[in-house]
Image (cartoon, rainbow, N blue to C red):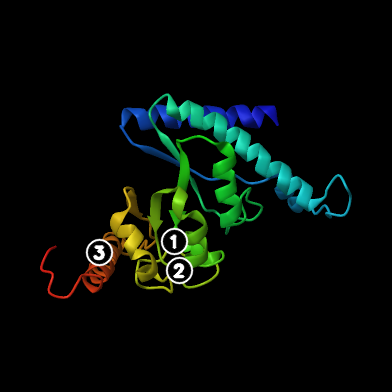
Amino acid sequence: LPEEQAADDEKIRRLVEIGAKLSGPVLAIHPGVVRELDGLERHGTPFVTKRHDREDLARRGWHLAVERIGAWADMAASAGLTLVVENEVHTRHTAAPTAEALAAMVEAIGRRNVRVNFDTGHAFVGAGLAAEFAALERHIAHVHLNDNARKVSDHLPLGTGRVDFPSITGFLARVDAALVIEVFSPDRPEAAMLESRKYILGVIAAASASSRIPGDTRT
């Protein structure tokens, strides 16, 4: 609806203003939910008619996301900000249900200041860390680090779940991007954050050491 789009535009405008005041290089957003699909499911409407065809509605939602994020990117560019779109494959009726759909979305938007915010836990829930990373690596400009043990988004402290962080440590060590530890541990938030930081730095250090030429003492 036009009024919903106007409200979303105003939210982004305010976030861009805040980001500019904070001199933050990126503004993280989600690809959005296909509202028609979400609404039909909430009302118990079956996807059986041409008007309510699931694939057609999903395709239209993807194209709308490309259009809207492109407009927001232009808004962000005026403040020197890059929009990083998160892999939200775990979200029902997301406009980008796969890593490939998100990569295609970023490419279709065609703005230099539109990149990907790669969430490790969400990747685990989707096609898996390695597969999603392979599809998105060339677009990644921001990273959310969290662990996962199930096919739901747990946001566990790093090293306590099943995410294979060593498989992407080469990228983490060299990427020019913020690595944000995003974990949920309400009973011990500070300890969980510090332990997660120690874990990921240890994994990166171990990977760097194993790739060093024997006898090379350089650091």
- Tag 1–tag 2 contact (CB < 8 Å): yes
Q: For the residue marked with disc 1, what is the amino acid?
A: Thr
Q: Residue furthest top?
A: 78
Q: For the residue marked with disc 2, what is the amino acid?
A: Asn
Which quadrant is home to the N terminus? top right
The residue at which mark 1 appears reads as: 120
| Mark 3 Cα-neighbour bin, 10 Å: few <14, some 14–19, many ≥20 | some
Which quadrant is home to the C terminus? bottom left
Q: Marks 2 and 3, how far apart in space?
A: 18 Å
Would you say 160 lies left or right of 41 here? left
Residue sitting nearer the eye, 17 or 84: 84
Is residue 43 visible to the viewer in this orientation of the structure? no
- Tag 3–tag 1 contact (CB < 8 Å): no
- Sequence-wise, the earlier of marks 3 and 1 is 1
Q: For the residue marked with disc 3, what is the amino acid?
A: Leu
Q: Position of residue 55 (x, y in %)?
A: 77, 52
Would you say 127 lies left or right of 140 here? right
The residue at which mark 3 appears reads as: 201
Q: Label 3's element?
A: helix
Residue sitting nearer the eye, 139 or 152: 139
